[in-house]
Image (cartoon, coloured by chain):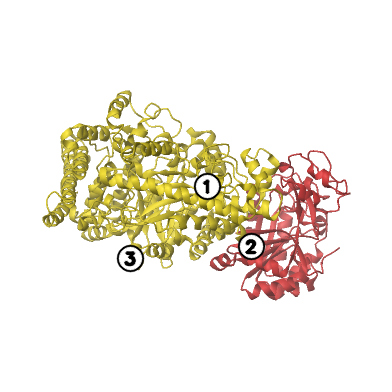
Amino acid sequence: MSQDRIDRIKNAVRTSRPGICTERALIWTRYFKNKENRKKHPSIQMAESLSDVLNKKSIKIYPDELIAGNFSSKRVGGSVFPELHGVVVMQDLFSFVKRETNPLEISKQEIWQLIKIIPFWLFRFLGFKAYRSKIDTFRFIADQLNARYYFINESGGIAHLAPDYEKLARVGTEGIILEVETLQEKVLENTEQWYFYESVKIIARGLARFGKRYSDLAFQMAEGESDPVRKQELLDISKVCERVPEKGAVTFREALQSIFLAQIAINLESLDNAISPGRMDNYLYPYYEKDLKSGALTREKAKELVSAFSIKMSEIVPVFSKLITKFHGGMFNGQVVTVGGIGRDGKDASNELSYIFLEVMDKLRMRQPNYHARIHKEAPGKYHDKIFEILSKGGNSPALYNDDVIVETLVRHGYDLPDARDYTAVGCVEPVCQGKSFSSTDAALFNVPIMLELALNQGRRFGSLLQAGPKTMAVSKMTSMGDVKQAFETQHGHFTERLIKDLQAIERANAAYHPTPLTSMLLDGCLENGFCSTSGGAVYNFSGIQCVGPVETGDALYAIDQAVFQDRKLTLPKLVGLLKQDLHDEKWRVYLRRLDKFGNDNEKVDDYTLYVLDTFTGNLNGRMNTRGGRYTTGLYSVTSHQYFGEVTGALPNGRRKGESLSAGIAPSNGQDRLGPTAMLSSVNRIDATNFANGLNLNVKWDSNTIRGETGRLALKNIFKTYFRRGGMQVQFNVFDPKTLLEARDNPDAYPNLLVRVSGYSAYFNDLTPEMKDEIIRRTYISV
Amino acid sequence: MNLEIEEKQATIFDIQRFSIHDGPGIRTTIFFKGCPLRCRWCQNPESHKSGIEVAFYKERCAFCFDCKDVCPEDAILESEDVRINFDHCSTCGQCVSACMNDALRLVGKRWNALTLLNEVLKDKDFFDDSEGGITLSGGEPTMYSAFLREFLPLVKKEGVHVNMETCGMFKWDNINSILPFLDLIFYDLKLMDSKMHQIYTGVDNIMIIENLSKLAVNFSNLQARMPVIPTINDTQDNIADTVRLLKKNNLETIHLLPYHNLGEAKLPGIKTDLEPLDLPTDNGVYLLSAKKLFENQGIYVI
């Protein structure tokens, strides 16, 4: 393999400033401005407009590339989705270039192009169409622009899936069209199903044509190429794209190319988030093995192709407004590649490609894709060794997923065993079945500690007269923890119902106005059932809602119990009075801060966090969404713990108004004082199988601790115990804290410092100042 | 000199989980309070006295002087660096309770065998998976021989690996009675010249060298260690003498520990006669040259 080539491509991508591409927004708008098109069936509209985009968008093949395809008109760029969250995003048009966090390049001309389309979409975007009543519409939009209690991501589309790329590679769009034609013959013309099949045919053809465009371009470029080596490479690209994605792939390279073009297209269909190639080592292995045998491929050449593919995944960025960035910071599209783990038969499925992907990941260390490794008891020793060797060298990838717990969890929540075994994470940490789940894993994020704030003030925010939640018991009347819990549960229940009502309106709007024929074509069940994935066509249809801030809430409840009912240092009204004054009395703040906290292996304290988790899962687990699936719960927060922290009042655990909440299920910042074994013992008290939408445990290591053979072994062994006792997931941030402080104060000196945020990696410089500080503070473990 | 505390309770000043440099695997290290030596370079000077004491951590102090209001002995001083007049302090602990900032703390807590057992068993799963265990450290754990005779059989019954770190200053009976419960001993050697030993540690080394020879015969898993104190014990002469002693006792390896001066920051906050040694923290240079000297003479350094 040519390392030089890979280095050059990587460098070109890494040094490109991310920008905004207007092409999708403009082509989409042109399609919908045509009144004739607006009369068509929504499925047809989506298939035609996406085909239009694929057919008209600018295409490019960059120097040295072996895998062709560009997400956008910029080397590193993102698209605007005016019919989804685009209107909200475009509020920020004038600040993208200059904003401090995740700046995006856009020219004046491009800004003007986008401004011109705003009026058309202002009353046509999805969030606006979700509610029939205009009062509900404006309440919902105002609520979401100023999210306090929850944030609904589905307003921007659903996405979050691992498409059936195995099938696409195997049969091509040609095979899919054949299958659809047979199915369509069995249904009546002009029915919903008929339109769905029609739309799949349209977009399948559109995708095939997209490949041909690259074939033609490569051929033209070859003609003008003077370097004979590059000329041949371009001719090879032309040959590959002539065949795929239309035809089934024959070679390893064709399979990669086919998948990558589909990856671009799905990212242009609806929300460009968490479209995950998934278990690539697993479904690509037959191609690898065959090519290796025939002599068409070497291990080194395969590694080069995988590297070329992998780098291209970093060419896309999300175009988010400042507000959405607070929830999903770090320029992250959540494209997951998972390696290792058991196969559908329950046996270890790791293979040589797993190691190739791990080596590529270790070598490239780029923002995307988001690399995850599945582990299980029977995994080969050399597989474990490889992973811990990478981690102890200071890599923050891969994140580790425990098959033994996740498979059990998925089965408990309704998956068939072989499908559960075939899971991959998407987005951050959410397990779904490859090619079968349409799980909307990031449907919404829920702010739990604010429920306690409401519970301590009769349903009003501290300092507010507005009755936001139900009027629960006044603190002056509360005489036991039972009373406090009762009020908390009432507030929590009330807002859960409101969330579900809003979310279901958005679910219905997605089905009615934004079907996704391309996504559905690559999800098992949709073709057989004749329904789009947005209408519940897929085999599995969960919706994931995230529990944010459970640890602060648990610690806060424990603090109330301890300070008011055990130590009797404070009365409840006095405590609430202190909170309303933002704990300005330093003496009391320090007292509350010093009370025991989650993460120190103290059962009495940890029980309160377990109680909060039980309340959350009890309210949501098992409820039905409108796609015929169930709501599941997740224990990860992306970067929303930061945002929800900003809007949440002071809490009895000694946390002041505005301070960040803790990420995922990690102990409150700096509060795990007894080291990693105690922290993991606390986390192990949680029954992870309640969280079918995944769990995120971030552990930060000082590089000194895990250095060398002693460190590698300690790391390996400590997680052996964590996983054996039911731990679901863990990911690492490894560095010298000094490095981070320097990087914070001198960002130019560390342009490419990669840190793990929440199931994904981001460049440190892409984070907000608060997030940077948090990464520095977060669960700092040193010896 | 007091080498023995004949009580069934032990005073322990710290229990550190996830220790990975005090023996194999993941370990919980128990720091016993009380030591017959007063090494000038001691990193845990709060371990010297066997009783519970009050310590002051000035970085945390908010200067509210709530401590002064509650002190029945009028032992609180209002200076910035020193808070306690140890001549008056009766270690009643009232100031510690009053301090909201954790700037005043009681060093040392009394443990009985059963509660200590429960505490260390919290990480049993981690010991099992990593082939780790517990490490008795200090201070000088052999001082608590009576306690250990009760505690260690309970630990061994649970199948936990036990390592002990000792300075070698003990009555033979005190270690002999617990020897069957130990799996590993880290034995510290500091200076071979007895007079120098007296100057830098407060005691001569006769008993320490005798005990080493006895242990080498009676215990199979003995590991010698030496803290490398720049210019004090890393001299050619001292290392040559150490090598001779090791060889005489059929010991082939030594574990060298780097010197750091972090312990000196603790001195103003506790009652002690120890004074800073004014040596720089070793960034590895001294350790490396000591390592070479040992290896040139056929002792393997770990």
> Viewer-proximal residue, A571 or A33?
A571
> Viewer-proximal residue, A34 or A696?
A34
Relative to A29, residue A543 above or below: below
Residue appearing at x 59%, y 56% in the figure: A482
Q: Which mark is residue B145?
A: none
Which residue is the site of mark 2?
B28
Which chain does yellow denote in the image?
A
Disc 1 vs disc 2: which is toward the camera? 1
Q: State the count of labels.
A: 3
In screen coordinates, is A174 left or right of A568?
left
Which chain does red denote in the image?
B
Which residue is the site of mark 3?
A416
Classify 10 Å Cα crowding around label 3: few (below 14), some (14-19), many (20 and above).
Answer: some
Give the letter of the chain under mark 2. B
* Rendered location of residue B120, percent (x, y): 65, 65
Disc 1 vs disc 3: which is toward the camera? 1
Visible in this render: residue A395? no
Q: Check disc 1 and report its element: helix, strand or loop.
A: helix
In the rendered image, which quarter is residue A578 located in?
top right
In screen coordinates, is A758 left or right of A455?
left
The amino acid pointed to by label 2 is Thr
Give the letter of the chain under mark 1. A
Which residue is the site of mark 1?
A451
Task: Find out whether the residues at labels 1 and 3 contact each other: C-beta distance under 8 Å.
Answer: no
Residue appearing at x 33%, y 65% in the figure: A416
Q: Check disc 2 and report its element: helix, strand or loop.
A: strand
